Image (spheres, rainbow, N blue to C red):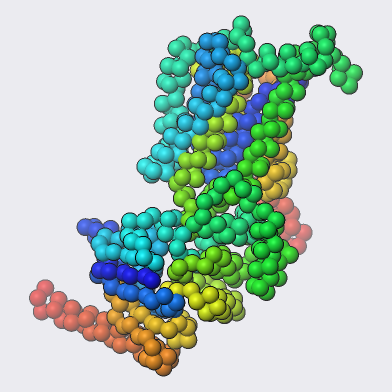
Amino acid sequence: MTLLIGAFTVGLILSLLALGVFISFRVFHFPDISADGSITLGASVAAVLLVAGVNPIAATVAAFASGLVSGAVTGILHAKFNIHKLLSGILVMTALYSINLHVMGRSNIPLMSATTLTTFAERLGSYILGSGEIVLVWGWEVTRRDASVLVSALFLTSLVGLAMYVFFRTNLGTAMRGTGDNAQMIRALGVSDENMMVLGLSVSNGLIALSGALLSQYQGFADVQMGIGMVVWGLASVIIGEALVRTPSLGLTIAGAVMGSVLFRLMVAIALRWGLNPTDLKLITAIFVFAALILPKLLDRIRESRVRAANA
Amino acid sequence: MLEIENVSKTFHPNTPNEVRGLKNINLSLEEGSFVVVIGTNGSGKSTLLNAVAGTFLVDSGKVTLAGFDVTDWPEHRRAGLIGRVFQNPFSGTAPSLSIAENLALAARRGLRRGLGWALAKQVQSELSERVKTLDMGLDDRLDNVIGSLSGGQRQALTLLMATWLKPRLLLLDEHTAALDPKSAEQVIRMTQETVSRERITTLMVTHSMHQAALLGDRLLMMHGGEIIHDLGGAEKRRLRPSDLLERFEELRREEQLDEIAAEMLRASYV
């Protein structure tokens, strides 16, 4: 049970990464792989501040802000200096590796003794659930810590998802979606597509850094390597989400990305439980994304050939 | 309204692909006039429109629009004054946004876009009212994505979007060239109605001699990056499609003559 709850919690925390990747990949068609760097940036900024005794909420907000800046840099490299999309992301990602080391001062910061958002969640949990170590949820025994952290993560993720939905329905957010869809049209309607892209990537990486900050507080450490392959992880969540909801509707796509992240994390947890070697995790992730990308087309082709065979 | 003074533009300068798009163009449009531009392929008619729209900045000269010197303004800033319809029906709308969202984007052309709800109640009621006037059966499909519409429907919507807030200048770039004859006729009728009802200053490029003769109160004919004919008033009203064809034929003969001359020169000197 602890395993499942842990997977659920990490899935929810990483769904913020999925939402960030959704903005860059799906809204702007921008394969922004600097996500690998900005998730670590968020984690390191939060960790350093937490160890220094800064209030966890302030530290998390600062991590979000650091992601805003990193995303804006990627956006400016592409929009203002006409650097290829992929290359802009790679440049920022590479630069962030050094920056993250500078921020942390070493390659790993443990947060075991620091007061974090997890501590806050536990306190809130004991306030609501009482002081018992074990609580019963639908007959299952769950530790108070796990339950309160899970509920807090769920609350926070829903809040961010809802805010994102509302934002993309405003005048500014609609213009942003229009930019990714048809930049020529959006310029003809008086919007600077360059500014929109900078702003959009900024928000995207802000969410990703936020995700990193929460992850480090949940797992109790920040590590300079923790971002490797995260962009693929986010993409996998978005793709699974799209397969789950099967509709272009904005609200459902956002909800789908969150569900996709949780489902993907659960699948990984179960696979590890069954004895998957953790060394193979990234390989399996990559293969999984590959399969998710080609399967829909493959299925279509099979269906078409069946129709042809039936008509022949 | 629109003043173009000594405007030149060369693409790919100092390369084998150098193209002199516009050669020292001078043009002045009066408020409320409807000017049609025709010309052969590569004559510079679309380049002229793009120079006004700000797709690129001109090499030399000055563009003044509605009293503003817009020569150095980027495209999106000029869009506050200009409504545009493109040749490609896919260019003017965002395919994965709904009809209503596309129109709501157009309803704030050139205005600040903040965190107000894009499809507020009052915007929506205005939307459905104006879409009804299109008479294309789209009023109960406002929540459908644009991608599901035909080229003609998209072009009609783009025209509606370009003129949603009355533009100081409307630029139409062969906006019926990619449509089937029936849709083209519908869009042209709509263009005529909108332009004359709102008295919008319009610059329209067309490939159709028929449209060129029938529409507008002034006709420009372009060739080789220059305006070679400028017909207005009674002369424009008397104009028939056959007259235009004749002028094109003249051009062709002149060019052939040039070619023959060049061939003769080559023969005697090379």
In front of the other: A36 or A116: A116
Residue B25 is situated, as x and y percent measured from the top left of the image, at: 28, 71
Residue B258 lies in quadrant: bottom left
The answer to whether residue A150 is above or below residue A77 is above
Q: At x 68% / y 68%, what residue is drawn?
A: B129
Residue B95 lies in quadrant: bottom right
Looking at the image, residue A5 sits to the left or right of residue B152; the answer is right
- Number of residue marks: 0
Looking at the image, residue B139 sits to the left or right of residue B231; the answer is right
Q: At x 37% / y 86%, what residue is drawn?
A: B232
The answer to whether residue B65 is above or below residue B96 is below
Quarter of the image with the N terminus of chain A in it: top right
Q: Residue most toward the left? A: B269
Observer able to see residue A230: no
Residue B41 lies in quadrant: bottom left
Looking at the image, residue B29 sits to the left or right of residue A211; the answer is left
Q: At x 76% / y 62%, what residue is drawn?
A: A311
Q: Residue most toward the bottom? A: B238
Residue A300 is situated, as x and y percent measured from the top left of the image, at: 69, 50
Residue A193 is situated, as x and y percent measured from the top left of the image, at: 47, 49
In front of the other: A281 or B58: B58
The answer to whether residue A1 is above or below residue B206 is above
Q: Residue most toward the right? A: A139
Residue A57 is situated, as x and y percent measured from the top left of the image, at: 61, 20
Q: At x 55% / y 36%, what residue is drawn?
A: A204
